[in-house]
Image (cartoon, rainbow, N blue to C red):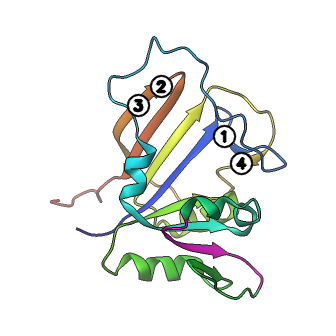
């Protein structure tokens, strides 16, 4: 089975993935479970199917890579930084490098964030799945998920989960129209 590039993150109802200072302490439910779906999204199970994590330098600077010591982690940066342990610093075309990784044998690739990095993958239209958790909050300002001038990408809703007011939507790219697949 072919590897997939999977974007998995949380956004506020108004489309932000982090507060202005990069904070994410707002990523919590509303405590109301009466609308919960029977099936739950398991982040641990998701991680079992991943062997590569891709993140930007700001995420790295917040030590988010420490959660993925048993994965190969690519960090997009404009700086020349020496690779160390499981960390690979990429100052070139990160989309091309991850596309090459996708063609190799292995588990799926987790596109972690942040916004600038994700934007390059959206513009290249190489994300296979979008798993988006919508947090019941309007932040009003922060770091947006979607930047301007993106291509139109038609999606298909594969699954949804609802837990404590957080709606998790799993989308895949639609097959090309006219295709027999």
Which image quarter: residue 3?
A: bottom left
Whole-Å distance between the Cαs marked 1 and 4? 6 Å
In the rendered image, which quarter is residue 116 located in? bottom right
Residue at image mark 2: 163
Q: Secondary structure at mark 1?
A: loop
- Whether tag 2 and tag 3 are in contact, CB under 8 A, the answer is yes
Which residue carries the number 3 mark? 161
Residue identifier under label 1: 15
Task: Tell me, yes or no, whether the highlighted magenta stretch contains residue 156.
Answer: no
Q: Residue at x 72, y 42 (%)?
A: 24
N-term-proximal mark, 4 vs 2:
4
Q: Position of residue 167 (x, y in %)?
A: 49, 30
Measured as percent of width and height from the top left, residue 143 is found at: 75, 49
Q: Label 4, on which residue? A: 144
* Label 2: which secondary element: strand
Point 43% across, 55% down: residue? 47
Residue lying furthest top: 34
Within 10 Å of disc 2 (Cα), the crowding (few <14, some 14-19, many 20+) is many
Q: In percent of the image, x 80 and y 33: which residue is there?
A: 140
| CA distance separating discs 3 and 4 | 23 Å
Up the image or down, 33 lies above or below 69; here it is: above
140, above or below 69, in the image? above
Question: Within 10 angstroms of label 1, few (less than 14), some, or many (20 or more) residues?
Answer: many
- Residue drawn at 46 percent across, 50 percent down: 130
């Amino acid at each position: 089975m072919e590897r997939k590039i999977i974007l998995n993150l949380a956004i506020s109802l108004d489309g932000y993935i982090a507060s202005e200072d990069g904070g994410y302490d707002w990523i919590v439910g509303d405590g109301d479970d009466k609308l919960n779906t029977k099936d739950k999204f398991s982040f641990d199970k998701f991680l079992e199917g991943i062997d590569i994590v891709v993140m930007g330098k700001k995420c790295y600077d917040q030590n988010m890579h420490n959660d993925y010591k048993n994965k190969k982690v690519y960090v997009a940066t404009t700086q020349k930084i020496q690779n160390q342990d499981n960390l690979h610093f990429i100052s070139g075309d990160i989309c091309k490098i991850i596309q090459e990784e996708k063609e190799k044998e292995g588990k799926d690739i987790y596109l972690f964030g942040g916004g600038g990095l994700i934007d390059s993958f959206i513009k290249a239209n190489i994300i296979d799945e979008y798993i988006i958790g919508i947090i019941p909050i309007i932040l009003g300002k922060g770091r947006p998920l979607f930047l301007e001038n993106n291509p139109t990408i038609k999606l298909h809703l594969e699954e949804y989960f609802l837990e404590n007011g957080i709606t998790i939507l799993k989308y895949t790219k639609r097959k090309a129209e006219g295709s027999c697949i």
